[in-house]
Amino acid sequence: MRALALISGLTVVAVACGNKSDDAGMADGTPPVPDADDSDDIEAEIVEPPDGDYLADDDGSAPPELNEAALTATINEAIAGSMEVHGGPVVAAYSEALAGMDSGCPTWGVDNGTPFWFDSCTSGTGTTFNGYGYHTEYDGYDDGDIVWNGMALYTVAELETPDGAVFRGAGGAGFMHGVNRDGLDVWSSYVQPGFAYDGAAAEGTWLADALDPEMSWYALRDPSGEGAASILSGAAQVADGPVAAIVFDQVLMIDAAWDSSCPIEPSGSISVLDNEGHWIDLYFHGPKWDGTPTPEDLCDGCGEAWFAGTYLGEACFDFSPLTTWSDYSFAE
């Protein structure tokens, strides 16, 4: 996978831990099943970009030429790796480094029920602590809808273990797995920029690749493996090629086992920044949580590309990794 480093200055829509959706259609724990007959009454049309000030910021330059091949290759790589960019490696690295504490270092307190440490010290085990960190562990925590396990943390700190491994944190991260009242597996993940670690817990993860992600996603899966959905938001900077950055905005996939009206295409949008400084926005037609079916003519895995209000054409992608849970070790 092409190396990705996530942009720290972009706004990412976080998915709230412990809530499937605010939409009534998710109240039973599964995506709503659209009526296939309804799609016959919907006219296929190109998705117009939403109103926004950026549409008026055209500097008069000619629209960029849409390089469909470059977009497809780059975004497919980003899609394939996106579900592996989660808060789990940060949680594991933080826990590994924090294990070097003792009764005298670091100093601990409690803030509104959340434990935190703050200090500049070296423990008896030889671990050095500088800064502070908050964390909450969930072990069978029942929020009334989902029983959660995992950890959420926020830290601005540097910890060095006796063997020289260094953990650095300057933000928040969390990785949670749960089971909802309908027996579905649920995952919630977020990670902000500012984390690094070169110890054992980072091996084989994006931390070992020195990435700096900002990514949030939420997912549901039937434990039988028949039925899954995920929603992804985040921003990725591409190390090479004609595309400099990618932004996922509420990219929602619902697979065929849950009777999605378009299991090969999400709803939401993806924006890319090319190396000439042009932002190109791609809008997709997949079903949303409210069950609105996708017209058959628009279910093709392709998105309409726009630049400053000018329609550029289509580009098509492989979104199957967003519902292919057999590919992810954390889902075993």
Image (tube, rainbow, N blue to C red):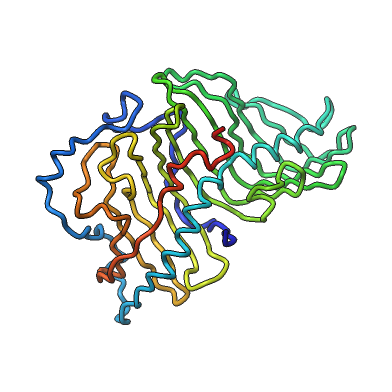
Side (left or right) of 15 relative to 44: right
- Answer with the quarter of the image where residue 138 lies: top right
Residue beneath the point at 83% across and 42% down: 161
**Residue 83 image offset from top left, x and y in percent:** 51, 45
Residue beneath the point at 59% across and 61% down: 3
Q: Which image quarter holds the C terminus?
A: top right
Outermost residue to the bottom: 61
Work out whether 28 lies above or below 59: above
Task: Count numbered badges in the picture.
Answer: 0
Outermost residue to the left: 41
Side (left or right) of 281 relative to 275: left
58 or 176, nearer to the observer: 176
Residue beneath the point at 46% across and 47% down: 321
**Residue 58 image offset from top left, x and y in percent:** 30, 74
**Residue 308 image offset from top left, x and y in percent:** 29, 70
Side (left or right) of 121 relative to 297: right
Q: Which image quarter holds the N terminus?
A: bottom right
129 or 195, nearer to the observer: 195
**Residue 149 image offset from top left, x and y in percent:** 57, 25
- Answer with the quarter of the image where residue 113 lies: top right
